[in-house]
Image: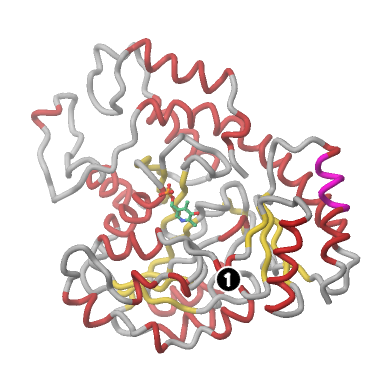
Amino acid sequence: MPGFEMFGESEKKQVQDVLDSGVLMRYGFDGMRNNHWKALELEKALSKRMESKYTQLVSSGTAALTVALASAGIGAGDEVIMPTFTFVASFESILAIGAVPILVDVDDTLTLDPVAVENAITSKTKVVMPVHMCGSMADLKALKEICTKHNLLLLEDACQAIGGSYDGKPLGSYGDLGCFSFDYVKTITCGEGGAIITNSEKYKTNADHYSDHGHDHVGNNRGAETHPFLGYNFRISELNAAVGCAQIERLDDFLAIQKRNYSKLRTSLEPLSNVSFRRVPTGGVENYSFLSFFLPSIELAKEAHTALGEAGIDACFYWFDNNWHYYKKWEHLTHKKSLGKLPQEVIDQLPDYSKSDFSKSDAWIGRTISCLIKLSWTEDEVANRAAKMKDVLENFN
Ligand SMILES: *Cc1c(COP(=O)(O)O)cnc(C)c1O
């Protein structure tokens, strides 16, 4: 998945442009910048590629989620539905604006189970936040129907699935708002960075102001700008955006390599009767950043994962025991371990997750192994890996 595997001349040239002008800031300094507006350029390129009217770049994927929620007016006491299997950024962004993360089960798509979502809706629910983990998506049609019925926002976290699609639309563009991360290990990277895409002019304007201290960005005299509302600093720098300008041009090439490598591994494992693959909802196209599959039981999956490591197959993840990606290890969330006092709404409304029944998630995630697809593998390396994985996995049934 990582774009950093493919750093080259185009990234260097883009960064050099910024260093030559000396303007590392995305706003202002019009006279000095030699017409280099890397953040604006990347926003334009993303809007085009993601078939969305507007893009707002920010400093990270976590910032993108936070700003997206804020731009839609989500705040204290609003409930946001999110999956048990995701990156910690999901609840961090929700808590950052004083809202309440409501965890719900995932199904064999490894993303939000629409039935569990509908069961979790209360009068305080405002947002459904599916997370397209490991390159594939939630059942977006079912989620959109639920959102329409209950008047909720659909916010897609497409940080791990850039370039995938659903119903012919780029992931991130199906909901009201979509978020991407360009951190160092994502499919394309800026070093650090993130983006929000939307067709709503209001959300875009709000995101633009909110991510820069509430500045309204009217005119080209920053000192004269007014502040329609409070904001923070979630700006991306021109240096980071410059790297992204080079990487977005290469996204489709990266996806083609991922698909080729993924397909070879998958073809090799397909004959195994003890291995089944993660379900991709009808109408969905993965971005092929991971190959995720199920073993027949939790015990077998654990043993198979260890055996893969021992056979030298690196970069395979067993999320069930992972500190960052599965609710079982989020004791800082479940025990409300905040540095300061959490908003009263969060304290009152946050469910007691130690009593929650996520056995349905456990049954899927406990059986899942996900193997990262690298861009830099040679054909021989992929063939070798495919054969070795088959040899190892066929022993676990
Ligand atoms: C990486 C990631 C994020 C956060 O992105 P950062 O740029 O690292 O802050 C959010 N959600 C998912 C699913 C991610 O993988």
Say which residue label 1 marks: 320
User: Hey, which quadrant is residue 121 in on the image?
Assistant: bottom left
Question: Is the residue 357 above or below the residue 69 in the image?
Answer: below
Q: Residues within 10 Å of mark 1 (few under 14, many from 20)?
A: many
- The residue under the point 14% across, 24% down is 221
Question: Is the residue 374 above or below the residue 111 in the image?
Answer: above
Q: Position of residue 232 (x, y in %)?
A: 20, 46
Judged from the image, the secondary structure of the residue bearing numbered disc 1 is helix
User: Hey, which quadrant is residue 291 in on the image?
Assistant: bottom right
- The residue under the point 34% across, 61% down is 92
Q: Quadrant of the N terminus?
A: top right
Q: Position of residue 373 (x, y in %)?
A: 69, 48
Q: Does any portion of residue 285 appear in the rendered image?
A: no
Question: Is the residue 90 above or below the residue 216 in the image?
Answer: below
Q: Does residue 141 appear to the left or right of 381 in the view shown?
A: left
Question: Is the residue 79 above or below the residue 14 in the image?
Answer: below
Q: Position of residue 274 (x, y in %)?
A: 83, 74
Q: Is residue 187 magenta?
A: no
Residue lying farthest to the front in this orientation: 310
The residue nearer to you, when weighing 205 against 223, is: 223
What residue span does the magenta drawing correspond to? 381-387
Q: Position of residue 156 (x, y in %)?
A: 47, 60
| Figure coloring | secondary structure
Decide if ligand 1 comes within 8 Å of the CB at mark 1.
Answer: no
Q: Main secondary structure of the magenta part?
A: helix
User: Hey, which quadrant is residue 65 in on the image?
Assistant: bottom left
Q: Does residue 320 appear to the left or right of 117 in the view shown?
A: right
Give, as a three-letter code, the residue at label 1: Phe
Q: Quadrant of the C terminus?
A: bottom right
Q: Total marks drawn?
A: 1
- The residue under the point 12% across, 34% down is 225
Q: Does any portion of residue 99 appear in the rendered image?
A: yes
